[in-house]
Image (cartoon, grey):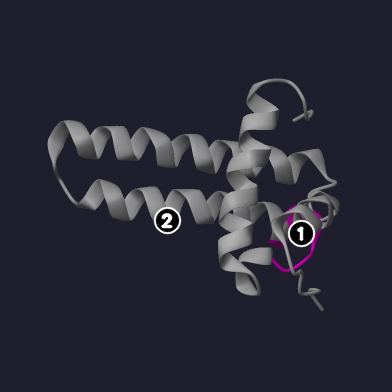
Amino acid sequence: MTARHASFAEFYPWYLTQHADRRCRRAHFIGTSSAIASIAQYIDSLNAWWLLFAVVSGYGGAWIGHFFYEKNKPASFSQPWYSFRADWVMYWQMLTGKLSW
């Protein structure tokens, strides 16, 4: 069962424990990168299907990581806003080398 957290500062360290498997973090990274590319494609084409693909690829990558590698329930099911924010923080930390991926 996922614990509820009162603040993002309390949530994020717990969030990282749910991403201990590097393959899960990699799946998140690939999904988020794909979502960014899809949003850029939408801006270029104004084709709304790219926005749908951004959501599917972003969450799809995360869910694959959790269901296949971590074997836990994504935090987005219980705390969607903190989870969304934490995914971007984790992405940035992986991109800048602060967190291994």
Q: Residue 5 versus residue 41: which sits nearer the camera?
A: 5
Q: Which one is in front in this view, the residue at disc 2 or the one at disc 1?
A: 1
- Identify the residue at image location x=13%, y=42%: 46
Provide residue 67's location: percent of width, then percent of height.
Answer: 70, 62
Figure check: 34 above or below 8 = above
Q: Please name the residue that numbered disc 2 is placed on.
A: 56
| SS type, badge 1 | helix
Q: Is residue 20 left or right of residue 96?
A: right
Of the residues under marks 2 and 1, which one precedes in the sequence?
A: 1
The question of residue 12 being in magenta is answered with no
Numbered label attached to residue 29: none
Q: Residue furthest bottom?
A: 1
Q: Are marks 2 and 1 in contact (CB under 8 Å)?
A: no
- Identify the residue at image location x=69%, y=29%: 94
Q: Please name the residue that numbered disc 1 is placed on.
A: 11
Bounds of the magenta segment: 67-74
Q: Which quarter of the rendering shows the C terminus? A: top right
Provide residue 97's location: percent of width, then percent of height.
Answer: 73, 20
Residue type highlighted by circle 2: Val
